[in-house]
Image (cartoon, rainbow, N blue to C red):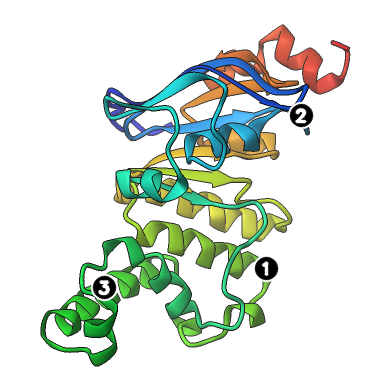
Amino acid sequence: MSDKKIGDVILDVKNISLRFGGVKALTDISFDVREHEIRAIIGPNGAGKSSMLNCINGVYAPQEGAITFRGQQFKHMDSHQVATMGIGRTFQNLALFKGMSVLDNIMSGRNLKIKSNILMQALRIGPAEREEIQHREAVERIIDFLEIQAYRKTPVGQLPYGLQKRVDLGRALAMEPQVLLLDEPMAGMNVEEKQDMCRFVLDVNDEFGTTVVLIEHDMGVVMDISDRVVVLDYGKKIGDGTPDEVRNNPDVISAYLGTSH
């Protein structure tokens, strides 16, 4: 890894347990995320990785435990509140507006930042017009950063999958999150698309200083770009440490090779 400076704990997950009826999705999970790091969450299918992200960004309310973000503890926050606090998210299944252009999709990520009311926006008067210009400039910077200038006006549904994933990342970045949750950003991509996405994740972390929490199945990617890795299996934490520590952890090895059950 580069010699970037990792800061203090920005996100602290403490003793999170989540149940759906009688099914335990997560059991007593604790880990922390430090400012400016890339923190990976890995594990076999059904390990509880997406459920963990859903607890962090307010989609699920865990029955036990608490999450602290920048010293502020929250037990039951909805997704909008969590986003307002500065936690952004991309999804495994693309939730883009397929008929809308790349520009408008990324612009939709600025909604939380828009202060003027709908009437002022519609009439584009005074402050609303100035504000829209500022938001458009921010979105154009993201489009340049993600190297998708050629597709600004293209409806997202017409783009190849790898570029749609890039637009999804752009929309999350438009919120200017302090912590960005990425749910399998490289799923379904070919080798070249994965390399591009790796580069963008590293650049987001480096140039924007954004803290990244990443779920990813491609172990090569995880080991290459993560500062620390937490490993879940059947909703329990079985490993936590640097990529090398995790790679050599016997519990992790047996979970991935299927010898532990």
Q: Is residue 223 visible?
A: no
Question: Mark 2 highlights which residue?
Answer: 44
Question: Mark 3 highlights which residue?
Answer: 135
In the image, residue 46 sits, relative to residue 157, either above or below, namely above
Quarter of the figure that contains the N terminus: top left
Q: Is residue 227 visible?
A: yes
Judging from the image, what secondary structure is the residue with disc 3 in?
Answer: helix
Judging from the image, what secondary structure is the residue with disc 2 in?
Answer: loop
Give residue 67's quadrant in the image.
Answer: top left
Q: Residue at x 70, y 57 (%)?
A: 189
Q: Earlier in the sequence, mark 3 or mark 2?
A: 2
**Identity, as a three-letter code, of the amino acid under mark 2:** Pro
**Identity, as a three-letter code, of the amino acid under mark 1:** Tyr
Q: Earlier in the sequence, mark 3 or mark 1?
A: 3
Q: Name the outermost residue toward the left.
A: 126
Give residue 4's quadrant in the image.
Answer: top left
Residue 108 is left or right of residue 165, and the answer is left
Q: Residue at x 49, y 43 (%)?
A: 181
Quarter of the figure that contains the C terminus: top right
